[in-house]
Amino acid sequence: MSGRVIVITSGKGGVGKTTTNANIGTALAKTGKKVVMIDTDLGLRNLDLLLGLENRIVYTIVDVVEERCKLKQALVKDKKNPNLCLLAAAQTRDKTAVTEEQLKDICEKLQKDFDFILVDCPAGIEQGFQNAVAGASEAIVVTTPEMSAVRDADRIIGLLEAKEEIKSYKLLLNRVRPNLIQSNDMMSVDDVVEILSADLIGIIPEDTGIITSTNKGEPIVNDEKSLAGKAYNNVARRIIGEDVPFLDLNEPKGFVAKMKKFFSNLKGETK
Amino acid sequence: MILANLYNKVMGFFRQTEPEEVESAKDTACNRLRVVLMQDRTNLTPELMDRMRRELVELLSKYVEMDKEALDLSLEQDGEQVALMLSIPVIRAKDEDEIKAALEAEDKEADDIDDDIEEEEAEEDESSDEEQVSEDEETSDSDEPQEEVEEDEKD
């Protein structure tokens, strides 16, 4: 077996890299694929929290590199899905604790046992980014329809294009707000795709459910009713190679949206 | 909620009566982003663009009388390629004597080589990639200065 190593990156912080990682990883594992996630954000680890695994971590990637444990010992199994593992970042060390070569080596070893190795990249374009990208051959660039996030994504795309090892990269547009796009207050999916001229792998709507799912340590893909969860599941299916159409986000779906619509119609009639 | 909706409706009514020309937030974002990404991708800062613009005005003024303030120089993305777009409102075509006078004044100051380079720059409106090409052209375009000489002889 030779697994695919995909780095999930963005440049800008707070656009949803780690959330994307946790959800795509969980969604891929649900399809029966063997998945390992590597958190390379040394000193600022969070992937463990999103997966609800923070209390199970014994060894980290730094322990592996400094040979205090075997690679397999450091892999933390997911609570629900035995196909899913996490290699956590060290919280007490900085980005220099692991080198590009060491990360490459870890990825190569994991490729033998896993279908997918998802590398969670830290924000920024410094050494942390270089390390995370080192072992990967594919990339997912996470961005949001905001100017600063798109600009940073453009920088990252430029850096990825300069790397020979990266064979392909795809764009994931996160935190999309259809109502703001409809009122021309936010850049549309098409605008961002055109400006960055990159292929799209997913459109994730802004979803308050993300907050509760993070609080519970339970990725939103496990919530059947969530639109963001559906969108992330679709991304996973596209990664596997299925041809899945993008969700139509324009129709108001939630109860609140329906009530708003109802009342606004009512107002219209009484006028 | 009814009140909120009523408020929105009223505000919406006033918004509709405003002229449509107001640029939407989305368009502003797109336009600003395009400009800033061009700068990021080409390493051309606004200062450098302004300098390029001034130098072009100086250069082109020798050949045509133009609206110097209205000369518009911008970078645009054309598919994969970045293009340098130059738009020059010409006020009046200069007559031959004027052009000649300007060029003669130039010739006194500078060598022939400089003329070559400037001639090519005037023709160019393409991307930065062509800078290297233009070096090659310098040698092959050696007949162009001769045209000027011919004109000189006619008068």
Image (cartoon, helix red, strand yellow):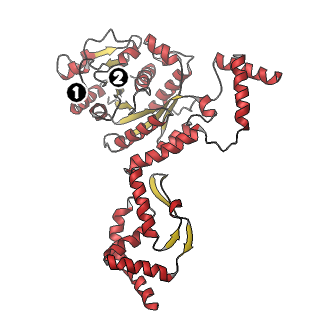
Report in which chain the residue with disc 1 lies. Answer: A
Rendering coords of residue B114 (x, y %): 33, 73
Whether residue A248 is visible, yes or no, is: no
Rendering coords of residue B140 (x, y %): 35, 76
Quadrant in the picture for the C terminus of chain A: top right
Res. A88 image quadrant: top left
Quadrant in the picture for the N terminus of chain A: top left
Crowd tier of the residue under label 2, counting other residues whose Cα lies within 10 Å: few below 14, some 14–19, many 20 or above = many
Q: Residue furthest bottom?
A: B154
Q: Nearer the viewer, residue A237 or A58?
A: A58
Q: Identity of the amino acid at label 1?
A: Val
Q: Nearer the viewer, residue B109 or A2?
A: B109
Residue located at (50% from left, 31% from top): A202
Q: Nearer the viewer, residue B109 or A245?
A: B109
Of callouts 2 and 1, the N-terminal one = 2
Label 2, label 1: how many angstroms apart (C-alpha)?
A: 16 Å
Query: Which element is circle 2 on?
Result: strand
Q: Which residue is mark 1?
A: A98
Q: Give the vertical position of B80 relative to A81 (above or below).
A: below
Q: Is residue B77 left or right of residue A133?
A: right
Q: Which residue is mark 2?
A: A37
Q: Give the vertical position of A173 relative to A155 (above or below).
A: above
Q: Residue furthest top?
A: A55
